Amino acid sequence: KAVVSTQSGHYGRAYGFKLNFLTKLQNTKAHDNRSNMLHFLANLLENRYPQWVNFKDDLRNLEKARRVSDDQLSKQLRGMKKSLTNLKKELEFHKNPERNGLTGSDKKIDIDDRFGTEMNAFLEYANDEYEKLEATYTNMGKCVAEIITFY
């Protein structure tokens, strides 16, 4: 139920309308009987506010999104960061075994071992992707705060 009111009252100075009002728009015909108030409003919306025409597309994932908690996302991001940090430490160890207390045959690394090369490339890619995720998460928090302030 939406509310139409520009006066002070139960809802304060709320703007909106009762949803059952939409059915009445279809019954309010133009003088030529070819169009109605609903057609007029749809055309007005399409011409003046084209960004609102497909607003329902913005809502398609709303049901799934409400099941996701901020705590879950934050915990997953922290877990990713920790995994990336651990991988970086492992690669440092792999790169310099003598600095890490290994001697003799323990510090020999197979010349054909591509672990360091491949995982360094992965780490760079993963760090870039993590930074994008972190920025998206931060932006999401700002958007949620704006929505809460708006409503």
Image (cartoon, helix red, strand yellow):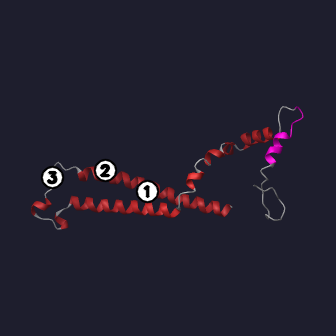
Mark number, residue 131: 1
Which mark lies nearer to you, 2 or 3? Answer: 3
Q: Quadrant of the N terminus?
A: bottom right
> Residue drawn at (79%, 41%), measured in percent from left and top?
38
> Residue drawn at (79%, 46%), measured in percent from left and top?
22
Q: Which one is in front, 62 or 85?
A: 62
Q: Is residue 30 magenta?
A: yes
Residue linked to disc 3: 110
- Crowding at dot 3, Cα within 10 Å, few <14 / some 14-19 / many 20+, comes out as few
Q: Earlier in the sequence, mark 2 or mark 3?
A: 3
Instruction: Count numbered badges in the picture.
Output: 3
Report the amino acid beneath label 3: Asp
Q: Earlier in the sequence, mark 3 or mark 1?
A: 3
Stretch in magenta: 21-32
Q: Quadrant of residue 98?
A: bottom left
> Residue drawn at (80%, 39%), measured in percent from left and top?
40
Q: Quadrant of the C terminus?
A: bottom right
Residue 128 locus on image (x, y percent): 40, 53
Q: Which one is in front, 70 or 46?
A: 70
